[in-house]
Image: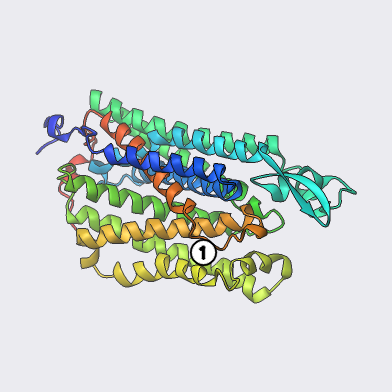
Amino acid sequence: MNTHDNFDGQYHFTGKIKTWSLIAIVIGVVTILAGFATGHTQRTFSNLLLMGYYFACVCAAGVMFCAIQYAAQAGWSASVLRLPQAFGKTLPYAALVFIIIVVAGLFTTHTVVIDGKSHVEPYLYARWATKDLIIKGSGIYDPVIYGKSGFLNIPFFLARLIGMLTIYSLFGWLLAKYSNNEDEVGGMKYYNKSYIASAVFLVLFGFTIPVFAFDTTMSLEARWFSTMFGWYNLAGLWVSGLAVMTAFFIILRRQGYYQWITENHLHNMGLFMFAFSVFWTYLWFGQFLLTYYANIPEEAAYFYRRWEPDFKWWFWLNIAINFGSPLLVLMSRDSKRYERTLLTMAILLICGHWLDYFQMIAPGTITPHEHWYQVMSWIEPGVFIGFAGLFTFLVLTALSRFKSLVPKKHPFLQESLHHHI
């Protein structure tokens, strides 16, 4: 096989395996409507925020994957770039869904009674977006929130959110466009453009993704902050994105696509999942240990709520899944080259990082009287299935619009097709 082979035909994804994803979308829509109709509005909004955030993060991880490969001038990944490029092309839809969820949660309000007084608060970001928090004499006036109101206010918050997601989506579109153009004209022109765009994206992404995490998840606990939280979220974004990509590669390969992917390519994906699971654990433990050791009330409150007896075992299950399982299973060379083991671990990490995101989001979005620690209601799996179906449908649709699953004029294609480690 050489770079002038015709990669159309059997190398074109037809999109015929999307049917089940439509069923999953229907399940999700029914769950969301039933959640609102049965009075579980707070929990439904919480799950929508969780899955909207997860959806956007996994798509952004696809853009990050492409950018890293181009910036590093990596050869092994040249033949597999179409899938993460499809993630990038899906990002605008994920961004739109996430923004709609955030806006709906901010502007849909309900009345709560605190110390005998009624207050109107939004379903999402109530810890800082409730107007009475910054009005002196309101009964719930909070000087800490008032001091942060120059940054945590709805117009500036939405402007940052829309701006960051627009930038990420633009670079995802650019990298896919340059790759398509490269297939048409060949040469190094569009590869060099991809290299420059990737370098710029990684700088912008590195500086803004912590802000994205601060805004969308940390601000749910507006009195609490951690300087490690942004990097901790970046590690989770990267591991969950790698796990989803690995699962897609293996499933598509079983369906007759990506037949040029060998155990050597899978080994690299498994190596990434293992290494960055350890990195995620380092950041998780560093954030937790410093808070636990210092035992400062305004810092410890965040972990105390997640360490209550009814939820404590979920807290440790998070560590067992996201650190213990990849450490025990993926450390050996053989496990990273065995398709079934790697797929099992990818699915496990996808679920594990859902649990991690749940622990970040649920305590700050579900009011105490609703017992947020009772996590296994019917709403959680239903919303998860719906978003998984939406993500799969959009990614496979984007993948089917590429003329070839192989970037057939990528300068490092031969190195990728003959990759061996």
- Give the farthest residue toward the front: 38
Residue 254: x and y, percent? 17, 48
User: Does residue 272 appear in the picture of this structure?
Assistant: no
Question: Residue at 81% across / 45% down in the picture?
Answer: 132
Q: Is residue 243 above or below residue 24?
A: below
Question: Residue at 62% across / 67% down in the picture?
Answer: 303
Residue 330: x and y, percent? 30, 67
In this view, the residue in front, 48 or 267, is 48
Left or right of 98 on screen, residue 85: left
Q: Is residue 132 above or below residue 333?
A: above
Can you tell which quarter of the image residue 329 is in? bottom left
Q: Is residue 306 above or below residue 130?
A: below
Q: Which residue is mark 1?
A: 283
Q: Quadrant of the N terminus?
A: top left
Q: Residues within 10 Å of mark 1 (few under 14, many from 20)?
A: some
Colouring of the image: rainbow
Question: Residue at 56% across / 46% down in the picture?
Answer: 38
Residue 160: x and y, percent? 62, 37
Dot 1 falls on a residue whose secondary structure is helix
In this view, the residue in front, 399 or 114, is 114
Residue 408: x and y, percent? 20, 33
- Give the farthest residue toward the top: 185
- Give the farthest residue toward the right: 137
- Give the farthest residue toward the left: 1
Question: Residue at 46% across / 44% down in the picture?
Answer: 31
User: Does residue 269 appear in the picture of this structure?
Assistant: yes
Q: How many marks?
A: 1
Q: Give amino acid for label 1.
A: Leu
Q: Quadrant of the C terminus?
A: bottom left
